[in-house]
Amino acid sequence: MKRNTLLHIFPAIAVLAIGLTLSAQKSHDASLARNLNNFNSIVKQVELYYVDTIDTDKSFKAAIEAFLSSTDPYTEYFSADDQEKLQKMTTGEYGGIGSYIMQRDGASFISQPMEGSPAAKGGLRPGDHIIKVDTTDVEKKGSDFVTKLLKGVPGTPVRVTVKRPYVADSILTMEIVRAKVQEPSMSYDTIINNIGYLRLTSFIDKTPAEVRRVLEKFKEDKDLKGVVIDLRGNGGGLVESAVELVGCFVPKGTEVVRTIGRDALQEKIYKTTRKPILPDTPLAVLIDGGSASSSEIAAGSLQDLDRAVLIGSRSFGKGLVQTPVQLPYGGLLKVTVAKYYLPSGRLIQAVDYSHRNPDGSVARVPDSLTNVYRTANGREVRDGGGLRPDTTVDWGKINRLVYNIVADNWAFDYATKFTAEHPQISQAKDFEITDSIYADFKKFIDPKKFKYDKVCEEMMKQLRTTAETEGYMNDETKAQIDKLAELLTHDLNQDLDTHRQEITEYLGSEIVGRYYYDKGKVAYELKTDKALKLAEEILKDKNKLDAVIGSR
């Protein structure tokens, strides 16, 4: 009797659930139609009666962006004019001169030409102030304006006039032929102490071919002890490229990631499709807070499969998948359609955009609310909040003095001066900031123009004010505060000596980049790279590797 009753109840519950779902959907559709009609009416009335003319393109773009702000930062609208940005994100290609442009005080400067680019071949250098593009005066124009003028159809010429500091004839004009510029996804590869190293800056359609080429080269080295993949600062890109990277190290047919949309039936599983190149070579992946999206797919799946040891600091935590949707009149919407889940089943999305604070802000998932999952060897890993490395590296906190030297372009400007005075330097890995170079750098800094973050001095002022307000200021108190203030007053020359080691790392990298581009910078920085040294120790010692990820 009870069974028959249940058989009647279950269909009733199912019908009720479907009915409630349909009712909710109907209510949602009615609300959507009502709001669209209201918005349409508002636009018509403003067009008819508003006292001034409305820039409709600008207004509608603002309205679209306001609407999308309630979703997540990755759901974006691209007008027909903006789609080049999306193409550049997925292919790394665009038509132009191939140089990064920086903005300072409302003007535009060459930051770094890409190696082998039209800009580099044409003679542009970091520090060049762009004052004219063809016949357009851009001396006081921002980087967005100048960049649009420099980009164009490959094969077309552009005349660029610059003002070059620290040289006699400071005004130079160069005719540069635009080309299809390809931003490489791999900035550097080498073998150091029998450890293959490659740094990836993004995941684009050409990434797998670049990676396989380098790994095949590593494979030829009979003394190879391990491989390090550096994904620090890599913001991601194409999921397929990340899957192919993982496929270089794990068996064909291995699940790397699966994506699930709003409807659980919208599930897609990504598996490796090719035979691995280095299936047994010890592997380490370097990550930090700038490692996101596809970088986290690659690193996280290798961690879940116990194929690699993760070294560095916690990753960004982006577990959302976007797809482009074509819109009328050339527009395009990049919309979040799913979340991705790693082989262990975990989602590493750090922020829940569906639950916002009253002010509209969102917060990261606290560690106390994360869930435990297991890797292939049974190790404990957690969801939410990005990837936690197996071995953590303390990067240290940047000193305020060092921060100001970099942020206020003292290191950049000195490198410009140094390059003008020195036609060549030693190889990137051999270059050193000598005592004489550092002494010259110290002279280069003008104490009157150097902007200190004078936190201690401001706190001393506040202490004096508080002491007077509270009635503690007498001769003895004043003398003690004066003594403390003297101890906390900045001595620029002394501070530059105290923090020479940290400053040297940034200054040397900036100088080397002028001669050897991004590859040179990486080669120079690796000499003191804590994460790489730690990776080398672990990869060369099977006991240490097994202690981290277990025996395979």
Image (tube, rainbow, N blue to C red):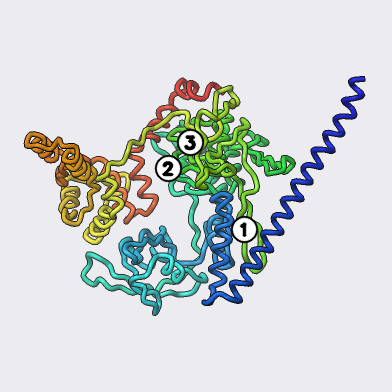
Residue 521 higher or lower than 40, as above or below:
above
Residue lying at 77% horizontally and 50% vertically, measured from the top left:
26
Q: Earlier in the sequence, mark 3 or mark 2?
A: 2
Residue 341 in the image: x percent, y percent? 62, 37
Left or right of 139 on screen, residue 324: right
Does the CB distance between marks 1 and 2 fall below 8 Å? Answer: no
For mark 2, does the 10 Å Cα neighbourhood hold few (<14), some (14 to 19), or many (20 or more) residues? some
Please state which amino acid type lies under the numbered disc 3: Val
Identify the image quadrant of residue 167: bottom left
**What residue appears at the point 50 percent right and 40 percent down from the top-left corner?**
363
Q: Nearer the viewer, residue 427 or 526?
A: 526
Query: Which of the two discs, 1 and 3, sits closer to the camera?
Result: 1
Q: CA distance from mark 1 to mark 2?
A: 39 Å
Nearest to N terminus: mark 1 or mark 3? 3
**Relative depth, front residue between 102 and 416:** 102
Reading the image, the residue beneath label 2 is: 190
User: Viewed as shown, does residue 110 lie left or right of 277?
Assistant: left
Q: Tell me where residue 107 appears, x and y as whole percent.
A: 34, 66
Marks 3, 2: nearer the viewer: 3
Label 3: few (<14), some (14–19) or many (≥20) C-alpha neighbours in 10 Å:
many
The residue beneath circle 1 is: 333
Determine whether the residue tagged by mark 1 lies in a helix, strand or loop. strand
As displayed, is residue 50 above or below residue 197?
Answer: below
Disc 1 or 2, which lies upstream in sequence?
A: 2
Q: Which residue is mark 3?
A: 285
Which residue: 19% across, 44% down? 461
The foreground one among 412 and 467 is: 467
Structural crowding at the residue carrying mark 1, measured as other residues with C-alpha within 10 Å and reported as few (<14), some (14–19) or many (≥20):
some
